[in-house]
Amino acid sequence: MASGSAAGVRVGRPRSQERRAAILAAAGDLMMEGGLKAATMEAIAARAGVGKATLYKWWPSRGAVALEGFMLRAADSWTLPEDVSAQEGLRVLAVAAVRLFTRTPAGPLMRALAADAQSDPEIAQALREQWMSPRRAVAAEVLRQGMASGELRADLDVEATLDLVFAPVYYRLLFSHEPLDESFAEACVAQVMTGVAAPGNNPAPPHAHTERNVQ
């Protein structure tokens, strides 16, 4: 009996992982196609070929599974090359965010989610946990490594610096008062670096980088 039970676990686990991956793929596709309104529990379950109860087994709400699926679809926008400087790492992340928002349906979707989050606590929480937190964690590690290596000031306020780098991107995304493009993202990073670089460390000017952006 013990042997049969163990075999059952080995068989069941991959099947469970495949089912979860199918759900997230379905949620991400629906989000990119029609936003949160299209990514209902019913629609996600139908596209993934599972019952709604399976979704609730892993996620507490529609917003949680929908945004996790969307996050996976956009995962390349917070992937970094190895052994980059802090300035290059921030530049890659900022430019990748601009590319995501301007070259895919993610831009209009993010504007809609930000609007919905003002009146829907569930969406607001999912947006913070599934979108903002992972992106900020990657960027924060870039800053901490830069502080440890001596590239950045040792007394840096990490959270404030993250806002200084990335808030302008979201500001232009939400209000569209000025163009949102890669040169703007690079200029923001270069400008912030003049204030956070360690003494004696001269940051590179905008456009002085090779093409190492995340695709």
Image (cartoon, helix red, strand yellow):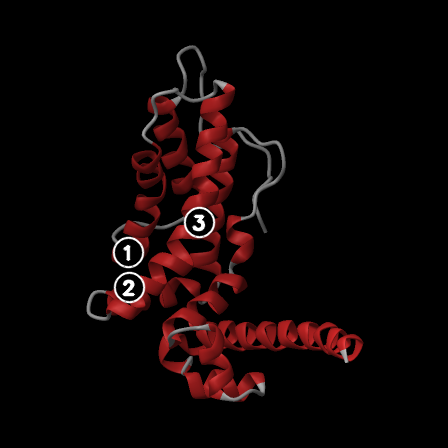
Which residue corresponds to the image point at 38% horizontal and 53% vertical from the top-left?
132
Mark 2 element type: helix
Which residue is disc 2 drawn over?
124
Residue ID at (28%, 57%)? 174
Marker disc for residue 190: none
Q: Earlier in the sequence, mark 2 or mark 1?
A: 2
* Marker count (numbered): 3
Label 1 secondary element:
loop
Q: Decide if residue 33 is in sight here.
A: yes
Outermost left residue: 119
Q: Residues within 10 Å of mark 3 (few under 14, many from 20)?
A: some
Q: Which residue is mark 3?
A: 135
Q: Residue 64 or 3: which is nearer the viewer?
A: 3
Who is closer to the viewer here, 195 or 54? 54
Please name the residue that numbered disc 1 is placed on: 176
Say which label, 3 or 1, has the lower sequence index: 3
As measured in the structure, the alpha-carbon distance from the residue carrying label 3 to the one carrying label 1 is 22 Å
Q: Classify residue 168 as left or right of residue 181.
A: left
Of 175 and 138, the residue lying toward us = 138
Q: Badges 2 and 3: C-beta atoms under 8 Å apart?
A: no
Cα distance, mark 2 to mark 3? 16 Å
Closer to the chain start, of discs 2 and 3, is 2
